[in-house]
Image (cartoon, rainbow, N blue to C red):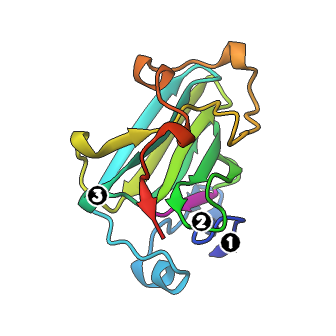
Amino acid sequence: MKVEPLAIADVRLITPPRFQDPRGFFSETWNQGRFAEAGIPGPFIQDNHVISRGAGVLRGLHCQVGPNAQGKLVRCVRGAIFDVAVDARQGSPTFGRWVGATLSAENWTQIWVPAGVLHGYCTLTEETEVIYKVTGAYDKAAERGVIWNDPDIGIEWPVAAADVILSDKDKVLPRLRDCPPLFYV
């Protein structure tokens, strides 16, 4: 397993090995001991599976606050996404900064997004499937988000703004500077 730290503390890019033969491949995508050694603690309590139809579907930037704040281990099992993490931890030296990586069925990478960091992604292919593990239970009252195109954050999405497909909820999210503090270091 290859684990690479990214420019925001605790965010990691992970590439599990794939063992291939003429029948296909085998890959261990989660191993509690190995991930703990790499600083990815878990425990994971829920798996989510998302299918998106159409390139340019943008989901995010989302998080949960409070006792059900979620860390997420995200992977793309069909198609490709541009995955983004934004540091929302007041007092962090990287507060308001973002990192991004392309996750795809082909490159087999995963990203660890710890609690306190906003998460979002944009689909790069027509048919996309994303599976992610979370460390906290879903809590509608704890849901928070920041608008995908917040100019203070300046995410360089690989899709033109006119081609972005958003949910009604994601269209009206506030800018980070207009949110009450979400997390503290």
Q: Which residues are magenta?
A: 109-114
Query: Going 32% across and 72% down the picture, which residue do you hit?
Result: 43
Residue 11 got which mark? 2
Question: In the image, residue 34 lies at what x, y percent?
Answer: 50, 82
- Do callouts 3 and 2 mark residues in contact (Cβ within 8 Å)? no
Query: Which residue is the site of mark 1?
Result: 5
Of the numbered discs 3 and 2, the one sitting upstream in the chain is 2
Q: What's the residue type where badge 2 is placed? A: Val
Of the numbered discs 1 and 3, the one sitting upstream in the chain is 1
Residue 115 visible, this angle:
no
- Do callouts 2 and 1 mark residues in contact (Cβ within 8 Å)? yes
Query: Which residue is the site of mark 3?
Result: 66
Query: In the picture, which quadrant includes the N terminus?
Result: bottom right
**Horizontally, is 65 left or right of 161 in the view?**
left
Query: Going 52% across and 47% down the picture, which residue do you hit?
Result: 119
Question: In the image, residue 135 lies at what x, y percent?
Answer: 33, 62
